[in-house]
Amino acid sequence: MQLRASQFVLAAAFSAAAIFIILIIFTSDRQDVSQQDKMQFLKRDSPAGPESDWPMFGADQSLHAKAKGSLPDSLELLWKFKTSGPVKSSPAIVSGVVYIGSTDANLYAIDLYKGNKIWAFHSGGSIEAPPCVVDNTIFIGSTDANLYAVDAEKGILRWEYKTDGQIAGCANRVKSGDGKETLIIAGSYDNKLYCFDSRQGELFWSYDTGNFINGTPAVENGVAVVGGCDAKIHVVSALEGKGIKEIDSGSYIAASVALEDGKAYVGNYEGIFLCCDINTGETLWKYEKDAPFFSSPALNDNEVVFGCKDNNLYCINRSNGVEIWSFRTLGEVNSSPAICGDKAVVGSDDGRLYMVRLSDGKKIWSYQIGQPVTSSPAISAGFVVVGSDDAFVYAFGPEQ
Protein backbone atom coordinates (compact mmCIF):
# COMPACT_ATOMS: atom_id res chain seq x y z
CA MET A 1 0.00 0.00 0.00
CA GLN A 2 2.87 2.32 0.84
CA LEU A 3 4.43 1.52 -2.54
CA ARG A 4 1.27 2.47 -4.40
CA ALA A 5 1.03 5.75 -2.50
CA SER A 6 4.60 6.62 -3.45
CA GLN A 7 3.93 5.74 -7.04
CA PHE A 8 0.83 7.94 -7.00
CA VAL A 9 2.77 10.90 -5.58
CA LEU A 10 5.54 10.37 -8.10
CA ALA A 11 3.06 10.13 -10.97
CA ALA A 12 1.28 13.23 -9.79
CA ALA A 13 4.59 15.10 -9.61
CA PHE A 14 5.51 14.04 -13.13
CA SER A 15 2.07 15.07 -14.36
CA ALA A 16 2.33 18.48 -12.73
CA ALA A 17 5.81 18.99 -14.18
CA ALA A 18 4.58 17.96 -17.64
CA ILE A 19 1.65 20.34 -17.43
CA PHE A 20 4.00 23.14 -16.30
CA ILE A 21 6.34 22.52 -19.23
CA ILE A 22 3.42 22.42 -21.66
CA LEU A 23 2.14 25.72 -20.26
CA ILE A 24 5.58 27.32 -20.69
CA ILE A 25 5.81 26.11 -24.27
CA PHE A 26 2.25 27.20 -24.98
CA THR A 27 2.85 30.64 -23.46
CA SER A 28 6.10 31.02 -25.38
CA ASP A 29 4.36 30.02 -28.58
CA ARG A 30 1.57 32.46 -27.87
CA GLN A 31 4.12 35.32 -27.41
CA ASP A 32 5.83 34.43 -30.70
CA VAL A 33 2.51 34.18 -32.51
CA SER A 34 1.40 37.49 -31.03
CA GLN A 35 4.49 39.26 -32.39
CA GLN A 36 4.10 37.47 -35.72
CA ASP A 37 0.42 38.42 -35.87
CA LYS A 38 1.36 42.03 -35.16
CA MET A 39 3.75 42.12 -38.10
CA GLN A 40 1.24 40.35 -40.34
CA PHE A 41 -1.32 42.95 -39.32
CA LEU A 42 1.04 45.76 -40.31
CA LYS A 43 1.75 44.08 -43.64
CA ARG A 44 -1.94 43.52 -44.33
CA ASP A 45 -3.32 46.89 -43.27
CA SER A 46 -0.52 49.12 -44.55
CA PRO A 47 -0.16 50.48 -48.09
CA ALA A 48 1.78 47.98 -50.17
CA GLY A 49 4.05 48.40 -53.14
CA PRO A 50 6.62 50.97 -54.25
CA GLU A 51 4.28 53.88 -53.51
CA SER A 52 4.76 53.24 -49.79
CA ASP A 53 8.59 53.13 -50.00
CA TRP A 54 10.84 55.85 -48.58
CA PRO A 55 13.87 55.32 -50.85
CA MET A 56 15.98 58.34 -49.83
CA PHE A 57 16.24 61.34 -47.54
CA GLY A 58 13.12 63.44 -48.05
CA ALA A 59 11.26 60.46 -49.55
CA ASP A 60 11.31 61.66 -53.18
CA GLN A 61 13.51 63.50 -55.67
CA SER A 62 12.08 66.90 -54.70
CA LEU A 63 12.56 66.14 -50.96
CA HIS A 64 8.95 66.65 -49.90
CA ALA A 65 9.45 64.32 -46.90
CA LYS A 66 5.83 63.20 -47.15
CA ALA A 67 4.62 59.61 -46.81
CA LYS A 68 1.57 57.89 -48.24
CA GLY A 69 -1.21 56.72 -45.93
CA SER A 70 -1.76 57.76 -42.33
CA LEU A 71 -0.52 57.13 -38.80
CA PRO A 72 -2.54 56.34 -35.65
CA ASP A 73 -2.53 58.67 -32.66
CA SER A 74 -0.24 56.36 -30.70
CA LEU A 75 2.73 54.21 -31.66
CA GLU A 76 4.60 51.47 -29.87
CA LEU A 77 8.18 50.28 -30.14
CA LEU A 78 8.32 47.21 -32.38
CA TRP A 79 12.06 46.62 -32.37
CA LYS A 80 15.43 48.29 -31.98
CA PHE A 81 18.65 47.35 -33.71
CA LYS A 82 22.08 47.84 -32.13
CA THR A 83 25.05 49.25 -34.04
CA SER A 84 28.48 50.09 -32.65
CA GLY A 85 28.27 53.86 -32.90
CA PRO A 86 25.84 56.80 -32.86
CA VAL A 87 23.32 56.64 -35.72
CA LYS A 88 23.16 60.10 -37.28
CA SER A 89 22.29 58.79 -40.74
CA SER A 90 18.62 58.78 -41.73
CA PRO A 91 16.94 55.60 -42.98
CA ALA A 92 15.68 54.60 -46.41
CA ILE A 93 12.98 51.91 -46.59
CA VAL A 94 12.39 49.86 -49.75
CA SER A 95 10.48 46.59 -50.21
CA GLY A 96 10.42 45.79 -46.51
CA VAL A 97 14.11 46.51 -45.89
CA VAL A 98 15.58 49.39 -43.86
CA TYR A 99 18.93 50.76 -45.08
CA ILE A 100 20.83 53.04 -42.71
CA GLY A 101 24.40 54.06 -41.94
CA SER A 102 26.21 54.33 -38.60
CA THR A 103 29.26 56.14 -37.33
CA ASP A 104 30.73 52.64 -36.84
CA ALA A 105 31.45 52.89 -40.62
CA ASN A 106 28.81 50.33 -41.58
CA LEU A 107 25.82 50.51 -43.88
CA TYR A 108 23.16 48.14 -42.53
CA ALA A 109 20.28 46.33 -44.20
CA ILE A 110 17.62 45.47 -41.59
CA ASP A 111 14.39 43.50 -42.00
CA LEU A 112 11.58 46.03 -41.52
CA TYR A 113 9.20 43.50 -39.98
CA LYS A 114 11.59 41.55 -37.75
CA GLY A 115 14.37 44.02 -36.95
CA ASN A 116 17.17 41.54 -37.68
CA LYS A 117 20.32 42.26 -39.70
CA ILE A 118 20.28 41.08 -43.29
CA TRP A 119 23.80 42.29 -44.07
CA ALA A 120 26.35 44.98 -43.24
CA PHE A 121 28.71 46.74 -45.63
CA HIS A 122 31.86 48.24 -44.11
CA SER A 123 33.14 51.53 -45.52
CA GLY A 124 36.38 53.38 -44.86
CA GLY A 125 34.85 56.03 -42.60
CA SER A 126 31.91 57.08 -40.49
CA ILE A 127 28.61 57.02 -42.38
CA GLU A 128 26.42 59.96 -41.42
CA ALA A 129 24.88 60.45 -44.87
CA PRO A 130 21.47 58.92 -45.63
CA PRO A 131 21.30 56.20 -48.29
CA CYS A 132 19.59 56.55 -51.66
CA VAL A 133 18.13 53.33 -53.12
CA VAL A 134 17.80 53.15 -56.91
CA ASP A 135 17.35 50.06 -59.10
CA ASN A 136 18.47 47.57 -56.44
CA THR A 137 21.57 49.62 -55.59
CA ILE A 138 22.26 51.73 -52.51
CA PHE A 139 24.27 54.90 -53.06
CA ILE A 140 25.78 56.32 -49.90
CA GLY A 141 28.57 58.71 -48.92
CA SER A 142 31.07 58.49 -46.10
CA THR A 143 33.47 60.71 -44.18
CA ASP A 144 36.24 58.89 -46.07
CA ALA A 145 35.18 61.04 -49.09
CA ASN A 146 33.88 58.08 -51.09
CA LEU A 147 30.51 57.62 -52.71
CA TYR A 148 29.71 53.91 -52.58
CA ALA A 149 27.37 51.91 -54.80
CA VAL A 150 26.32 48.76 -52.92
CA ASP A 151 24.20 45.84 -54.12
CA ALA A 152 20.91 46.03 -52.20
CA GLU A 153 20.41 42.26 -51.96
CA LYS A 154 23.93 41.06 -51.22
CA GLY A 155 25.56 44.06 -49.56
CA ILE A 156 28.61 43.88 -51.82
CA LEU A 157 30.41 46.78 -53.48
CA ARG A 158 29.57 47.55 -57.09
CA TRP A 159 31.72 50.66 -57.45
CA GLU A 160 33.10 53.61 -55.52
CA TYR A 161 34.21 57.11 -56.42
CA LYS A 162 36.72 59.11 -54.39
CA THR A 163 36.05 62.84 -53.95
CA ASP A 164 38.28 65.27 -52.05
CA GLY A 165 35.97 65.78 -49.09
CA GLN A 166 33.52 63.96 -46.87
CA ILE A 167 30.00 63.28 -48.17
CA ALA A 168 27.36 64.19 -45.58
CA GLY A 169 24.22 64.52 -47.70
CA CYS A 170 22.11 61.94 -49.48
CA ALA A 171 22.55 61.26 -53.18
CA ASN A 172 19.68 61.81 -55.62
CA ARG A 173 18.77 60.52 -59.07
CA VAL A 174 17.72 61.81 -62.47
CA LYS A 175 17.04 60.13 -65.81
CA SER A 176 19.35 60.78 -68.74
CA GLY A 177 18.10 62.84 -71.68
CA ASP A 178 16.96 59.74 -73.60
CA GLY A 179 15.41 58.24 -70.48
CA LYS A 180 17.48 55.06 -70.76
CA GLU A 181 20.05 55.70 -68.03
CA THR A 182 19.81 56.67 -64.39
CA LEU A 183 22.26 59.30 -63.19
CA ILE A 184 23.27 59.83 -59.57
CA ILE A 185 23.90 63.32 -58.18
CA ALA A 186 25.72 63.96 -54.90
CA GLY A 187 27.52 66.83 -53.15
CA SER A 188 30.83 66.79 -51.27
CA TYR A 189 32.81 68.86 -48.81
CA ASP A 190 35.30 69.44 -51.65
CA ASN A 191 32.82 72.16 -52.80
CA LYS A 192 31.58 70.15 -55.78
CA LEU A 193 28.31 68.67 -56.95
CA TYR A 194 28.91 65.45 -58.91
CA CYS A 195 26.91 63.43 -61.43
CA PHE A 196 27.68 59.75 -62.12
CA ASP A 197 26.43 56.93 -64.28
CA SER A 198 24.58 54.70 -61.80
CA ARG A 199 25.82 51.39 -63.25
CA GLN A 200 29.56 51.95 -63.57
CA GLY A 201 30.28 55.09 -61.56
CA GLU A 202 31.55 56.98 -64.60
CA LEU A 203 31.72 60.72 -63.91
CA PHE A 204 29.39 62.68 -66.18
CA TRP A 205 30.02 66.16 -64.79
CA SER A 206 31.05 68.13 -61.71
CA TYR A 207 29.96 71.61 -60.70
CA ASP A 208 32.06 73.87 -58.47
CA THR A 209 30.47 75.90 -55.68
CA GLY A 210 32.23 78.27 -53.33
CA ASN A 211 32.19 76.07 -50.20
CA PHE A 212 31.12 72.77 -48.62
CA ILE A 213 27.94 71.04 -49.76
CA ASN A 214 26.34 69.53 -46.66
CA GLY A 215 22.79 68.80 -47.80
CA THR A 216 21.02 66.66 -50.36
CA PRO A 217 20.45 68.05 -53.88
CA ALA A 218 16.76 68.25 -54.79
CA VAL A 219 15.75 67.41 -58.37
CA GLU A 220 12.75 68.71 -60.33
CA ASN A 221 12.11 69.15 -64.06
CA GLY A 222 15.70 68.55 -65.12
CA VAL A 223 17.37 70.83 -62.58
CA ALA A 224 19.25 70.06 -59.38
CA VAL A 225 19.00 72.57 -56.55
CA VAL A 226 21.34 72.52 -53.57
CA GLY A 227 22.26 74.89 -50.76
CA GLY A 228 25.92 75.53 -50.03
CA CYS A 229 28.09 76.76 -47.21
CA ASP A 230 28.88 79.66 -49.56
CA ALA A 231 25.40 80.95 -48.53
CA LYS A 232 23.95 80.38 -52.00
CA ILE A 233 21.18 78.25 -53.43
CA HIS A 234 22.64 76.73 -56.60
CA VAL A 235 20.35 75.87 -59.51
CA VAL A 236 22.18 73.51 -61.89
CA SER A 237 21.25 71.67 -65.07
CA ALA A 238 20.94 68.04 -63.93
CA LEU A 239 21.99 66.68 -67.34
CA GLU A 240 24.79 69.07 -68.26
CA GLY A 241 26.13 70.29 -64.92
CA LYS A 242 25.93 73.93 -65.99
CA GLY A 243 25.01 76.60 -63.48
CA ILE A 244 21.65 78.20 -64.23
CA LYS A 245 21.21 80.53 -61.29
CA GLU A 246 22.68 81.41 -57.88
CA ILE A 247 20.43 82.84 -55.18
CA ASP A 248 22.10 84.48 -52.20
CA SER A 249 20.48 83.43 -48.89
CA GLY A 250 22.66 85.64 -46.69
CA SER A 251 24.38 82.88 -44.68
CA TYR A 252 25.65 79.36 -45.11
CA ILE A 253 23.15 76.58 -45.71
CA ALA A 254 23.58 73.25 -43.93
CA ALA A 255 20.06 71.95 -44.64
CA SER A 256 18.59 70.47 -47.81
CA VAL A 257 16.29 72.39 -50.13
CA ALA A 258 12.72 71.15 -50.72
CA LEU A 259 11.25 71.88 -54.16
CA GLU A 260 7.79 72.18 -55.61
CA ASP A 261 6.50 73.98 -58.71
CA GLY A 262 9.70 75.94 -59.19
CA LYS A 263 9.84 77.16 -55.59
CA ALA A 264 12.69 76.32 -53.22
CA TYR A 265 12.28 76.21 -49.43
CA VAL A 266 15.26 76.18 -47.05
CA GLY A 267 16.67 77.76 -43.90
CA ASN A 268 20.20 79.08 -43.20
CA TYR A 269 22.62 79.57 -40.31
CA GLU A 270 21.47 83.14 -39.59
CA GLY A 271 17.97 81.99 -38.73
CA ILE A 272 16.40 82.97 -42.05
CA PHE A 273 14.02 80.52 -43.67
CA LEU A 274 13.13 81.57 -47.19
CA CYS A 275 11.08 80.68 -50.22
CA CYS A 276 12.65 81.46 -53.61
CA ASP A 277 11.59 81.23 -57.23
CA ILE A 278 14.36 79.19 -58.87
CA ASN A 279 13.43 80.49 -62.36
CA THR A 280 13.64 84.20 -61.60
CA GLY A 281 15.93 84.08 -58.57
CA GLU A 282 13.46 86.18 -56.61
CA THR A 283 13.04 85.67 -52.87
CA LEU A 284 9.27 85.45 -52.36
CA TRP A 285 9.24 85.60 -48.57
CA LYS A 286 11.42 85.24 -45.49
CA TYR A 287 10.70 83.91 -42.01
CA GLU A 288 13.26 84.88 -39.37
CA LYS A 289 14.25 83.51 -35.94
CA ASP A 290 17.22 84.09 -33.61
CA ALA A 291 18.76 80.64 -34.09
CA PRO A 292 20.18 78.62 -37.01
CA PHE A 293 18.20 76.21 -39.15
CA PHE A 294 19.95 72.87 -39.69
CA SER A 295 16.71 70.90 -40.10
CA SER A 296 15.42 70.40 -43.65
CA PRO A 297 11.78 71.19 -44.46
CA ALA A 298 8.86 68.87 -45.16
CA LEU A 299 6.20 70.09 -47.60
CA ASN A 300 2.49 69.56 -47.20
CA ASP A 301 -0.18 70.93 -49.56
CA ASN A 302 -0.34 74.33 -47.87
CA GLU A 303 2.32 74.16 -45.16
CA VAL A 304 6.06 73.81 -44.76
CA VAL A 305 7.36 72.24 -41.53
CA PHE A 306 10.95 72.43 -40.21
CA GLY A 307 12.98 72.39 -37.01
CA CYS A 308 15.24 75.02 -35.47
CA LYS A 309 18.13 75.15 -33.02
CA ASP A 310 15.91 77.26 -30.72
CA ASN A 311 14.25 73.93 -29.69
CA ASN A 312 11.14 74.50 -31.81
CA LEU A 313 9.38 72.80 -34.68
CA TYR A 314 7.69 75.38 -36.92
CA CYS A 315 4.81 75.21 -39.37
CA ILE A 316 4.60 78.04 -41.92
CA ASN A 317 2.08 78.95 -44.59
CA ARG A 318 3.74 78.10 -47.90
CA SER A 319 2.14 80.94 -49.83
CA ASN A 320 3.12 83.88 -47.60
CA GLY A 321 5.59 82.69 -44.92
CA VAL A 322 3.23 83.43 -42.01
CA GLU A 323 3.64 81.20 -38.96
CA ILE A 324 0.74 78.82 -38.35
CA TRP A 325 2.11 77.25 -35.15
CA SER A 326 5.25 76.33 -33.25
CA PHE A 327 5.88 73.29 -31.07
CA ARG A 328 8.56 73.50 -28.36
CA THR A 329 10.76 70.56 -27.43
CA LEU A 330 13.43 70.44 -24.71
CA GLY A 331 16.38 70.40 -27.11
CA GLU A 332 17.59 71.60 -30.49
CA VAL A 333 15.61 70.25 -33.44
CA ASN A 334 18.28 69.28 -35.96
CA SER A 335 16.29 66.25 -37.14
CA SER A 336 14.18 66.88 -40.24
CA PRO A 337 10.44 66.22 -39.94
CA ALA A 338 8.43 63.70 -41.93
CA ILE A 339 4.76 64.23 -42.77
CA CYS A 340 2.15 61.46 -42.97
CA GLY A 341 -1.53 62.29 -43.28
CA ASP A 342 -2.48 64.82 -40.62
CA LYS A 343 0.69 64.34 -38.58
CA ALA A 344 4.37 65.32 -38.50
CA VAL A 345 7.08 63.22 -36.84
CA VAL A 346 10.46 64.63 -35.78
CA GLY A 347 13.35 63.91 -33.42
CA SER A 348 14.95 66.29 -30.95
CA ASP A 349 18.28 66.59 -29.17
CA ASP A 350 16.27 66.17 -25.94
CA GLY A 351 16.28 62.45 -26.74
CA ARG A 352 12.66 62.15 -27.81
CA LEU A 353 10.77 61.34 -30.96
CA TYR A 354 7.62 63.46 -31.30
CA MET A 355 4.42 63.19 -33.29
CA VAL A 356 2.36 66.39 -33.58
CA ARG A 357 -0.90 67.28 -35.29
CA LEU A 358 -0.46 69.36 -38.46
CA SER A 359 -3.58 71.44 -37.94
CA ASP A 360 -2.53 72.99 -34.61
CA GLY A 361 0.93 71.69 -33.66
CA LYS A 362 -0.31 69.89 -30.55
CA LYS A 363 1.68 66.90 -29.34
CA ILE A 364 -0.15 63.63 -29.94
CA TRP A 365 2.56 61.17 -28.90
CA SER A 366 6.22 61.01 -27.93
CA TYR A 367 8.78 58.34 -27.07
CA GLN A 368 11.77 58.95 -24.83
CA ILE A 369 14.89 57.36 -26.25
CA GLY A 370 17.25 59.23 -23.96
CA GLN A 371 20.01 60.28 -26.34
CA PRO A 372 19.80 62.97 -29.06
CA VAL A 373 17.82 62.10 -32.19
CA THR A 374 19.50 64.00 -35.02
CA SER A 375 18.58 61.28 -37.51
CA SER A 376 15.46 62.13 -39.53
CA PRO A 377 12.53 59.69 -39.43
CA ALA A 378 11.37 57.68 -42.44
CA ILE A 379 7.76 56.49 -42.70
CA SER A 380 6.69 53.47 -44.73
CA ALA A 381 3.81 50.98 -44.60
CA GLY A 382 2.72 52.01 -41.12
CA PHE A 383 6.26 51.99 -39.71
CA VAL A 384 8.25 54.96 -38.39
CA VAL A 385 12.01 54.28 -38.37
CA VAL A 386 14.74 56.53 -36.95
CA GLY A 387 18.28 56.36 -35.59
CA SER A 388 19.69 57.79 -32.37
CA ASP A 389 22.99 58.82 -30.84
CA ASP A 390 22.59 55.85 -28.46
CA ALA A 391 23.74 53.63 -31.38
CA PHE A 392 20.31 52.06 -31.96
CA VAL A 393 17.89 52.11 -34.89
CA TYR A 394 14.25 52.20 -33.70
CA ALA A 395 11.08 51.04 -35.45
CA PHE A 396 7.61 52.05 -34.26
CA GLY A 397 4.16 51.01 -35.41
CA PRO A 398 0.49 51.01 -34.36
CA GLU A 399 -0.36 49.74 -30.90
CA GLN A 400 -1.97 46.28 -30.91
Image (cartoon, rainbow, N blue to C red):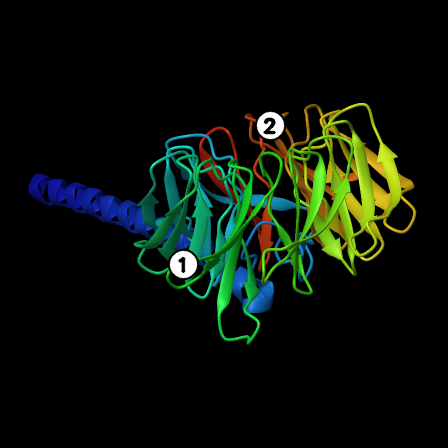
Q: Residue at x 72, y 48 (%)?
A: 298
Q: Viewer-proximal residue, 132 or 11?
A: 132
Image location (x, y in percent) of residue 43: 52, 64
Image location (x, y in percent) of residue 86: 46, 30
Q: Secondary structure at mark 2?
A: loop
- Mark 1: which amino acid? Glu
Nearer mark to the viewer, of 1 and 2? 1
Image location (x, y in percent) of residue 250: 78, 32
What residue is pinned by disc 1?
202
Looking at the image, residue 303 sits to the left or right of residue 308; the answer is right
* Total tally of numbered discs in the picture: 2
Q: CA distance from mark 1 to mark 2?
A: 41 Å
Q: Which mark is residue 87?
A: none
Q: Residue at x 51, y 45 (%)?
A: 130
Q: Which mark is residue 351?
A: 2
Q: Residue at x 73, y 33 (%)?
A: 268
